[in-house]
Amino acid sequence: MGTQDGIAALTFDPEQIRCVSALLRHGVELMVTGGYAVRFHGHMRFAKDLDVLVGNDRQNAERLCFALTDILRVAHPSITPEAFEGQSRQVNFESWGLKFEVLTGAAGVDFQRTYGRRFMVPLGIAEVPVIPKDALIAMKRIAGRSVDLSDIAALEATTT
């Protein structure tokens, strides 16, 4: 896949742009994963929401809390560094009207090692980090849902 194709695959809606921009502005270490990462790595399929994998060390958990408060435009009692530090959580913000999900851990992925190999994709908002294909496949292999197995087959057939 050429760079232009990868960039086109990361076409976020305005609210998703607002979310990822807030995370980046607050210095959150993150990588786009899920459907958008599948698209970036060459399999153009529908992405229902924007999934981001974030580091769950103390400093990143604090940054994440500031960013989420900014995104939600209100402080929420469950958004504390302790709720994210060292945790492997999946937090969906659909009830807030956002097609956005934060994962603070993923089976099969060492965040720090993988973050060092991330793809930096220049978009209008900033450079957006995307998970490497092998780590995305590892996550999906462990999740094992039918959509994940389908994504794996398509990703293994592409070259990036």
Image (cartoon, rainbow, N blue to C red):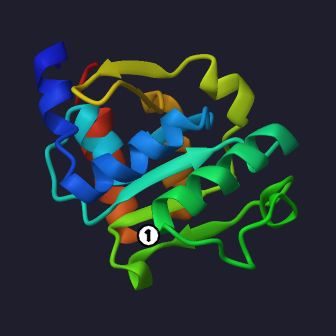
Q: Where residue 85 appears, x then y in whole percent? A: 84, 54
Q: Where residue 81 appears, x then y in whole percent? A: 82, 58
- Residue 21 position by quadrant: top left
Q: Residues within 10 Å of mark 1 (few under 14, many from 20)?
A: few
Instruction: Name the outermost residue toward the front.
Output: 74
In the picture, the quarter occupied by the N terminus is: top left
* Position of residue 126 in the picture relative to residue 157 (left or right): right
Q: Where residue 77 appears, x then y in whole percent? A: 74, 79
**Secondary structure of the residue carrying numbered label 1:** loop
Residue drawn at point x = 29 percent, y = 47 percent: 17
Q: Is residue 130 visible?
A: yes
* Position of residue 76 in the picture relative to residue 41 (left or right): right
Nearer to the camera, 160 or 59:
59
Q: What's the amino acid at mark 1?
A: Arg
Q: Which residue is mark 1?
A: 145
Q: How many marks?
A: 1
Nearer to the camera, 138 or 104:
104
